[in-house]
Image (cartoon, grey):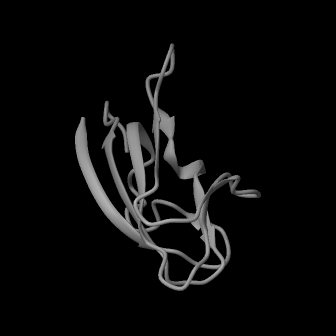
Amino acid sequence: MVFFSTTLTTATTAQMIMKNKPAIKRVRQVLFVIQSLGTATYVAIGGRDFQDKKFTGAGQSISIDASGSRKWVDISSIFCSADTADAIVEIFGESYDEGCC
């Protein structure tokens, strides 16, 4: 298990949330925090085609973790977008590195 953190400046089209750390694909847990909206009115997080979790204020967050029989979450399947390209998302987590990544 390895702790990681990064930030991501949003785009107006969906981009991988781990764009700045592409080697991390499997995580035990991850926390997304809206650091700044900039001029954006929202930041959306979700799948490639549709980001359904919308955040409208700095400091809002969402946590995702492996539960039940799952040992890890595929973070490469999580994307984000915003209505302007200047919001900042902080990402903190614990990678699942059992012979992988």
Task: Tell me residue 66's x, y (percent).
Answer: 46, 27
**In the figure, 35 relative to 94: above or below?**
below
Looking at the rendering, which quadrant does residue 41 occupy? bottom right
Q: Is residue 62 left or right of residue 43?
A: left
Q: Which residue lies furthest to the front in this view?
A: 57
Task: Tell me residue 85's x, y (percent).
Answer: 56, 84
Task: Tell me residue 86's x, y (percent).
Answer: 50, 83
Looking at the rendering, which quadrant does residue 2 occupy? top left
Residue positioned 33% across, 41% down in the render: 95
Residue positioned 26% across, 51% down in the render: 4
Residue positioned 49% across, 75% down in the render: 37
Residue positioned 50% across, 65% down in the render: 57
**In the figure, 90 relative to 27: above or below?**
below
Q: Which of 35 and 95 is in front in this view?
A: 35
**In the figure, 30 relative to 98: above or below?**
below
Q: Which residue lies furthest to the right in this view?
A: 49
Q: In this view, does 50 lie to the left or right of 78?
A: right
Viewport quadrant of the C terminus: top left
Q: Which residue lies furthest to the top in this view?
A: 69
**In the figure, 3 relative to 91: above or below?**
above
Viewport quadrant of the N terminus: top left
Q: Which of 32 and 56 is in front in this view?
A: 56
Q: In this view, does 89 lie to the left or right of 98?
A: right
Q: Is residue 52 left or right of residue 41?
A: right
Task: Tell me residue 69's x, y (percent).
Answer: 51, 14
Counting the numbered discs, the total is: 0
